[in-house]
Amino acid sequence: MISRRTLLKSGASAVATSLAAPAIAQASRKISFLTWNIIDQETMIRGWIARFCKDRPGVEVEWLDKKGPEIPVFYQTQLVAGTPPDVINTQGALGLEYAAQGALLDLTPRLKAEAAVATRFNADYLSNWAYEGSNYMLPFYITKTLLFFNKPMLEKAGLSGPPQSFDQLLEAAQKMTSGEASGFLTLNFDWLYWPLYAMNGVELLSKDLSKPTFNTATAMAITDRLAKATEAGAINKISWTGRWVEPNGAFAAGNVGMLHAHSPAYFFVKGQGKWVSPETLGVAHAPGGFATPNSHGLGISKASKNPDLAWDFLKFVTNEGAQELGVNRKLVTGNIAVDTANLSALEKNDPLVYSILKTQLEHTDKMVGNWRLGNDSKIKEAFWPELQNALLGRKDAKAALADAERKVTRELKRA
Amino acid sequence: MAGADKAIAAGAMPLTGWWQRKRTRDLMLVVCFLLPSLTIFFLYRVLPLAWNGLLSLQYWSPLKPARWAGLDHYEEMLLYDDVFWQALTNTLIFIAVSPLAIALALGIALLVNGNLKGAAIYRSIVFLSYPLMTVAVGVIWRWMYDERGGIINFALRESGLIGKPIPFLQSFEWALPSVIAAEIWQVLGFYMIIILTGLQSIPPHLYEAASIDGAPRWAQFGRITLPLLRPSLFLCAVVGILNSFTSFDLVYIMTNGGPGHATELLITYIYKSGFGQTKFDYAAALTVVQFMLLLALTYLANLLAGGNAGALQRR
């Protein structure tokens, strides 16, 4: 029969062993890598991980991929649990929100210590994730808005080229409108429509981001004109009601003259629109060269147990990995050397994609709608529904902008 | 032990300690049986509810220490948040539509309860929608409503009823009725089966007696069918109310609350506030309001059912 003493000893040793297990696991240096809806790139990512781990014995990288709507839910629950993924991929301003919450590691000291890493990237894109003077993410793959146009429709309307001003844009849209055909469509999520206001000199917030500055006579006039053009059918209503599938699908159907969208829209449109070819699809900057970025960045969770290893992985992915990513997915990464090499190859192999991606690296000093806010989604939620009401004619522009101003002010104060 | 119990029962042994009392030991036995369920109920119902109530009175985000907010979130919600009122109104509309769905189901149940040829097939067809996953229902209806390739727009245009396609789910006017139609379609089969079961449990001799007495069909319906269907209709109403509060998946798939917040329900707004905008504290306050509303409606439903729903029938 086992004595009480023996039983207690065995129990104590079992507890000690189980407590030691996590420590042993930690010693193996493992990091996790959370990506945003790129499960189709599994082979490439597993290849990155294999190459990264090959030179680092005892290192393990766990890869997780989640769809867009799942990422915030997943990441926040992991934050609460104290087990966030070490390296995280986010889109748009989400990285800034996580930075403001204190979830992300400040990369500024590392970028200062390794100047060669910082200078790899297009400085305007790198600064997209700067919050209160510190940088929290590196560019993974970058996008900003541009103007796609249906060349046959443009020609049929007697237009010689894409519009160069807001007035010309509305005029061109009106000329291309007939029957079921409409002249202009824009994506609206994540401030992607903001260039329409920026090209008219309207600013959403003051420079110090402390108060709204959009409730002006100019903004009212612009909103009113957009609403009237929408009512007349020159601007497709889906611009203000759809998200991704609906507007891109409508343009792909071939009876919309211009689409204001970010570069990934091309692949959707090409996939659905049989009419799309270098002869029929034109590409230009929005008037004034204004564009809203909607890029993907990579950051490190502050709670990472292996931040140095995560930083190494970040550098690896945004350099060695970027080359492969750019080629596979036909995109630009923000890494200057990689993008230069990839674009050079694309210019010969796929001139249309080349012309689209080239716009992503031009006028990067005119990126708008990317305020460095720690509560971007709340400001967006306060502003957009009111503007939407005005654009769809449910409220007059004056009342809508006044209501939006009241709500944005309140949200800024609550922050 | 059995001997001791008998002795106590016979009054041969005095009742000394509290533990030795039969009533105490019976009570402990009951507690032991109930404990697992009570523990789960406490951990997964009471504790989260209490924590949620507390959270609604704090400023809280995952990585920052909580601060006392008092009723600030409630003030924000009730006085400044238009979306809350829109979501509440939509939720109440969803609830208010339940009687319509029940009335439709009653009509169909009456039809397939008769001597209709092929009634069993019709019953199966109507019921088929219910076991479908709500996500699948959402996707199917989204395509059916599609402006360009949807069958509904195609049918309406082909029949000459409309000239231009209707953007059902992108229109502020059409989005909510469109989602409600899909919701009704899905739950109709369930209501029909419940009502059909109720109809078939009504003794036929009541109708025979009424017929002999010369009561017209509408009087038979009003005086026999409806009163005897009351439990079935009550069950449908309760399920309808609960469905209205938990229609998250259908709305999320079909419209995600849009356009604007035209189809926003309290449940979708809670989700968006918590996980979309990291306002877990505010989402907690919204949840408290939803809970109170549900509580009030349940109380009302109980009153309408005679005030003793769920009570034990003692003989």
Image: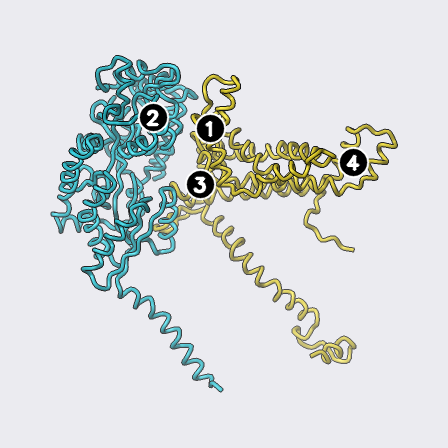
Chain colours: A cyan, B yellow
Give the labeled residue for mark 1: B150
Which of pointers 3 and 1 lies earlier in the amino acid sequence?
3
Q: What's the amino acid at mark 3?
A: His
Q: What's the amino acid at mark 2?
A: Phe
Residue B73 shows which numbered tag?
Answer: 3
Q: Quadrant of residue B15?
A: bottom right
Name the mark nearer the viewer: 2 or 3: 2
Name the mark nearer the viewer: 3 or 1: 1
Q: Rounded to the nearest whole Å, what is the CA distance between mark 4 and mark 3?
A: 50 Å
Label 1 resides on the chain identified as: B
Q: Rounded to the nearest whole Å, what is the CA distance between mark 1 and mark 2?
A: 17 Å
Q: Position of residue B22 (x, y in %)?
A: 70, 72
Which type of secondary structure does the marked residue at label 3 adopt? helix
Q: What's the residue at 57%, 34% (across, down)?
A: B185
Give the labeled residue for mark 4: B224
Q: Is residue A4 left or right of A89 when viewed as pictured? A: right
Task: Choose between B93 and B20: the one closer to the eye.
Answer: B93
**Are both tags, 2 and 3, on one chain?**
no
Q: Is residue A253 left or right of B221 when viewed as pictured? A: left
Q: Is residue B304 visible?
A: no
- Outermost residue, front side: B117
Q: What's the residue at 37%, 24% (across, down)?
A: A402
